[in-house]
Image: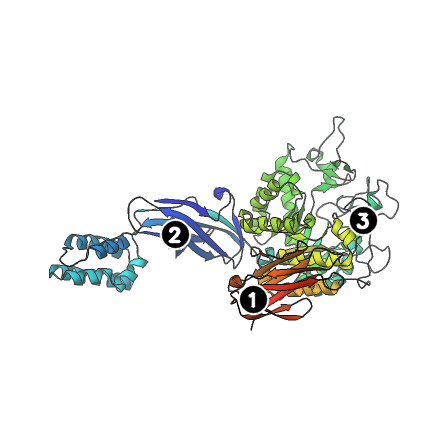
């Protein structure tokens, strides 16, 4: 028995495919053997740690390709396999059906069939066993009485056929081994809207350091905008030595707050709070308010230490040293980070370092953090990530890991394979129609869709892309629509809703970056797009088609500046068509080609196109529609297709 070309699997089963609770796993495989036997196959699935397999039959398609599916129902690790076997009963019924012609003597064939039936009856349970033996006895009686056709009818009839399907003879079969792994995460892994903000900038008084209490007061506004996850940069004590000043200046002046990524001082390290933010009681109130509002907390996990971090004195061997014995600071030429010491994962005390990094994760899980945005994981050994994520999941399978790995594609993919549930992407730098469609197709249509979920951040504290620097308010709306609808997981960094776009000349970095200073904002400033962000998130929430990650269908539009794509759920009860003007400066028009057959709409059928952003409604008929988008008034359509 041959079972090969099994899909889905990642690297031959070395790494798990990924799903969220409630998602289907559609399995296919080539199954065949020598000869002319009828075959059968069972798809088997179970959670790791469970002994009993859940089984469902697979169906045969063309060219020996078999198909089956199951739904995962709980978080954690699962596995699935395929058992295929020669179906002796079906082979026998096929053979006897072909030979059963007038005048044929089928005594030998009927005796062979009785052997097959008795083998299955021996393993049948309860009433089924009694019924099978009753039919077998009737076949033997008919055969003894010379009633050949009666014996045949009993053997191939619906009663015996049904019972034999429940107790097939699998003695001549093969089970795929080892079983193929699955990692099942919570649904928020695949559908969420993230909002990043610095707690120290939440004060409503100029130059006053914000606190967790200030942050609590902002949470309701964030939730009202429709965000599910608040993402906090590091909230730990900040080092004094070589503290960075405003705009990454090497010289700090009194009052400069430094970079939160330079972690550690006399008040503690990675398991301490920056005192100016508040106390642990304040943190507990922040966590409680998030839970009350239905918001999850993502915390930046940064393996950097300031020169003042307690680890430097307690574990100097955890750091890199120069020939003169001094500790090396971090560099990413031409950038220098004198305020940060990177950890040396090649230390002789590997076990001590790894265990401490695990302890930090578990500490914050106990403090209410459900997601970790991991800073630069591509600069740490991949075996460490596979180990530490596995250890966290062994105790807390609900925890989500996001890789902030703006690096080469192969490393990004490997990090996803070893356990990161989400990853940052190159979306931030994809601006043209061809680039966007090619990249999104790579993420959602090929093998990557089985293990990689791209979180489409429109901006970050580190990245202010040129399209936002120069495109003004229309560009911010355009990129928000793209991020929120091309991926089911997206995020923005605070200030995006105010269209903040002042950059350091010639760079993709914010001028007066919040990484180095406190920013106080007027959240109702003229020109803000808070209401648009809120509407986009409401549309996402109300549209099941936008909850899925792997269902983007790009549509033809005869203008390179207009991008069109659709998403729909499995039963086509929710069909969303997005049309986005990629040019933030000029009006663009196009003929949109609507795939009526895919949508289940007749060629001459009239249907409604309801723009959920503007609440305008259009009557469309046929496979084409005229679209016009002027960035001064309307940057995008998010259209719900409704049949009359």
Circle number at residue 622: 1
Q: Residues within 10 Å of mark 1 (few under 14, many from 20)?
A: some
Quadrant (top left, top right, bottom left, bottom right) of the N terminus: top left
Report x, y in % for residue 378.
64, 40
Of residues 274 and 524, the one nearer the viewer is: 524
Cβ–Cβ under 8 Å for marks 1 and 3 = no
- Label 1 vs 3, first from the N-terminus: 3
Q: Secondary structure at mark 1?
A: loop
Q: CA distance from mark 2 to mark 3?
A: 58 Å
Q: Which residue is mark 2?
A: 62
Task: Spot the residue most to the bottom.
Answer: 644
Q: Which residue is mark 3?
A: 503
Of residues 479 and 419, the one nearer the viewer is: 479
Q: Secondary structure at mark 3?
A: loop
Report x, y in % for residue 441.
58, 50
Cβ–Cβ under 8 Å for marks 2 and 1 = no
| Horizontal side of residue 554 vs 142, given as left or right | right
């Amino acid at each position: 028995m041959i079972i090969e070309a099994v899909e889905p699997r990642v690297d031959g089963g070395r790494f798990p495919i990924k799903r969220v609770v409630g998602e289907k796993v559609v399995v296919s495989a080539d199954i065949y053997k020598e000869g002319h036997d009828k075959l059968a196959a069972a798809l088997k699935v179970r959670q790791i740690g469970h002994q009993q397999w859940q089984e469902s039959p697979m169906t045969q398609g063309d060219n020996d390709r078999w198909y089956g599916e199951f739904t995962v129902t709980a978080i954690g690790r699962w596995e699935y396999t395929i058992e295929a076997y020669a179906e002796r009963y079906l082979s026998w019924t096929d053979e006897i059906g072909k030979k059963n012609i007038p005048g044929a003597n089928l005594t030998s064939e009927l005796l062979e069939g009785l052997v097959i039936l008795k083998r299955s009856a021996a393993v049948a349970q309860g009433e089924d066993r009694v019924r099978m033996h009753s039919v077998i006895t009737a076949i033997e009686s008919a055969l003894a009485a010379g009633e050949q056709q009666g014996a045949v009818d009993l053997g191939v009839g619906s009663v015996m056929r049904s019972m034999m399907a429940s107790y097939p003879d699998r003695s001549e079969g093969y089970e795929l081994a080892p079983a193929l792994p699955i990692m099942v995460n919570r649904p928020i892994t695949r559908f969420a809207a993230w909002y990043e903000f610095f707690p120290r900038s939440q004060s409503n008084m100029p130059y006053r350091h914000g606190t967790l209490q200030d942050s609590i007061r902002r949470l309701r506004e964030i939730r009202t905008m429709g965000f599910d996850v608040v993402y906090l940069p590091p909230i730990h004590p900040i080092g004094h030595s070589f503290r960075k000043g405003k705009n990454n200046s090497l010289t700090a002046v009194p009052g400069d707050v430094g970079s939160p990524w330079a972690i550690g001082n006399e008040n503690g390290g990675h398991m301490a709070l920056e005192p100016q933010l508040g106390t642990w009681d304040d943190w507990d109130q922040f966590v409680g308010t998030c839970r009350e509002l239905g918001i999850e907390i993502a915390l930046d996990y940064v393996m950097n230490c300031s020169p003042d971090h307690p680890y430097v004195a307690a574990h100097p061997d955890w750091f890199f040293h120069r020939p003169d014995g001094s500790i090396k600071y971090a560099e990413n030429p031409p950038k220098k980070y004198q305020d940060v010491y990177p950890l040396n994962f090649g230390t002789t005390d590997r076990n001590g370092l790894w265990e401490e990094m695990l302890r930090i994760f578990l500490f914050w899980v106990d403090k209410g953090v459900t997601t970790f945005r991991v800073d630069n994981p591509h600069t740490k050994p991949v075996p460490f990530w596979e180990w530490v994520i596995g250890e966290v999941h062994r105790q807390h399978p609900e925890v989500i890991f996001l890789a902030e790995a703006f690096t080469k594609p192969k490393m990004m993919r490997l990090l996803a394979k070893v356990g990161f549930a989400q990853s940052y992407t190159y979306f931030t730098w994809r601006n043209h129609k061809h680039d966007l469609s090619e990249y999104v197709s790579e993420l959602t249509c090929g093998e990557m869709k089985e293990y990689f979920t791209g979180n489409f951040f429109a901006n970050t504290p580190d990245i202010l892309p040129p399209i936002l620097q120069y495109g003004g308010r229309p560009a911010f709306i355009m990129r928000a629509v793209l991020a929120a609808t091309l991926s089911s997981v997206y995020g923005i960094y605070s200030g995006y809703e105010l269209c903040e776009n002042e950059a350091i000349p010639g760079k993709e970095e914010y001028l007066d970056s919040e990484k180095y200073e406190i920013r106080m904002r007027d959240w109702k400033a003229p020109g803000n797009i808070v209401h648009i962000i809120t509407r986009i998130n409401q549309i996402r929430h109300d549209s099941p088609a936008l909850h899925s990650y792997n269902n983007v269908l790009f549509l033809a539009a005869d203008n390179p500046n207009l991008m069109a794509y659709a998403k729909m759920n499995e039963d086509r009860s929710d069909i969303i068509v997005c049309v986005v003007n990629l040019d933030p400066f000029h009006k663009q028009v196009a003929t949109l080609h609507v795939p009526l057959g895919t949508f289940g709409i007749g060629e001459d059928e009239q249907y409604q196109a309801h723009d959920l952003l503007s609440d305008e409604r259009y009557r469309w008929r046929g496979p084409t529609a005229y679209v016009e988008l002027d960035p001064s008034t309307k940057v995008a359509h998010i259209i719900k297709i409704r049949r009359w």
